[in-house]
Image: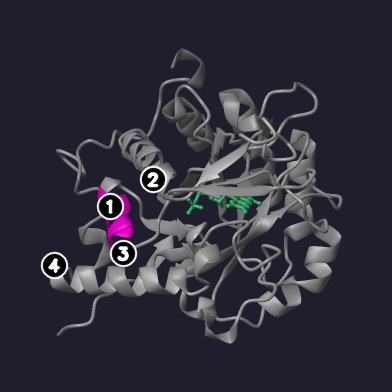
Amino acid sequence: MPAIDLSLTLPEGHPRALQLHNPVMIASGTFGADGYGDGLPPTANFQGLGAVVAKTTTLLPRAGNPQPRMAQGWGWMLNSIGLANPGIDAVLRDKAPQWATWRVPVVLSIAGERASDFAQLASMIEGVPGVAAIEVNVSCPNIEGGLEFAQSRDLAAEVTARVKERTTLPVIVKLSPNVTDIVAVARAVEDAGADALTLVNTLIGMTIDQDTARPVLGAKRGGVSGPALKPVALAAVFRVYEAVRVPIIGVGGVTTGEDALEFLMAGATAVQVGTANFADPQASWQVLRDLTGLLRRRRVAALCECVGIAHDSPAKTRPAPATIPATLR
Ligand SMILES: Cc1cc2nc3c(=O)[nH]c(=O)nc-3n(C[C@H](O)[C@H](O)[C@H](O)COP(=O)(O)O)c2cc1C
């Protein structure tokens, strides 16, 4: 049986593009107990994956939201971690040196309370060995306006442009499904210079304890992830694929190789596995093995053969680079 070429360059043409051995990554916040790989068993095999996205890191340490922060039900998980993290200084000092010795590229996710925080974080990361790319998490409130960055085309674009100014690394912007028109946000972020998009972050949700008649989560609301999120994420990837030219990384409920293949068919170049890692630390590796088997059975020789094939006209539906001013869309 001929070998399948699962490797990819993300994005093509970028001077410091990510060189991935395969298209399966670990999603931000789901890499070990702390999101930075803590407590993973040696069997987790994460070094054989395409990439690992570390926990979203902020300028200052954050304690996160009140407990309880996790709940689960049939096909879904809710979390209200609230971006708890030790802050950028500690991450660059204590984690990045180790990442520099790994075979797997590590993408560092960043978030801030104002656009200037994102710019400062990007400057601090520049030149640090061990960080292969930046994932910009815009699903956090902008304290200067209240709205989440991800919910405004202009704010999301501003953050993207500010990060791009300060880094030579690939900049991947992770969008939120909690918007009316994710396509408009994706276009604005692409126009602002994003090198790739990750779709999607968690969907707002809640659950109530019927005995106490109170919301289960300390923060009352949280983010829905897991299989229940998959159809939402898939539709986002499908729609955005027809509107932008930059590569898309699909995330939301990927638990099996079949899930990953659906994302590729919708137009994702790579996928991330999140919640499934909590049930089984080898889940991402298993997704990769299943996906490889599926592609082999379909006699696929290279990954790019399946990207976007769910579209009526996979290549033609993608428009020429946008020339329409963002304000007219
Ligand atoms: C416990 C938990 C923590 C998360 N933390 C982050 C985070 O720090 N930054 C981020 O961008 N996404 C975070 N996410 C969202 C995931 O990266 C992913 O987008 C989402 O869970 C959907 O994928 P899944 O259904 O495979 O989990 C977190 C998700 C979970 C479940």
Task: Give the label on residue 257, or none.
Answer: 3
Given this view, does label 1 or label 2 mark the residue nearer the observer?
2
Residue 287 x, y percent position in the rendering: 37, 68
Counting residues from the start of the chain, the first of labels 1 and 4 encountered is: 1
Counting residues from the start of the chain, the first of labels 4 and 2 encountered is: 2
Q: Residue at x 40, y 56 (%)?
A: 254
Task: Give the label on residue 197, or none.
Answer: none
Residue 123 x, y percent position in the rendering: 77, 53
Q: Residue at x 67, y 33 (%)?
A: 215
Highlighted range, magenta: 258-265
Q: Mark 4 sits on what residue?
A: 298
Q: Main secondary structure of the magenta part?
A: helix
Looking at the rendered structure, the kind of residue marked 1 is Glu
The answer to whether 311 appears left or right of 18 in the picture is: left
Q: Mark 2 sits on what residue?
A: 230
Looking at the rendered structure, the kind of residue marked 2 is Lys
Residue 263 magenta: yes
Q: Is mark 2 within 8 Å of ligand 1?
A: yes
Counting residues from the start of the chain, the first of labels 3 and 2 encountered is: 2
The quarter of the image holding the C terminus is: top left
Residue 185 magenta: no
The quarter of the image holding the N terminus is: bottom left
Given this view, does label 3 or label 4 mark the residue nearer the observer?
3
Q: Nearer the viewer, residue 88 or 170?
A: 88
Counting residues from the start of the chain, the first of labels 3 and 1 encountered is: 3
Task: Give the label on residue 262, or none.
Answer: 1
**Tags 1 and 2 in contact by the CB under 8 Å rule?**
yes
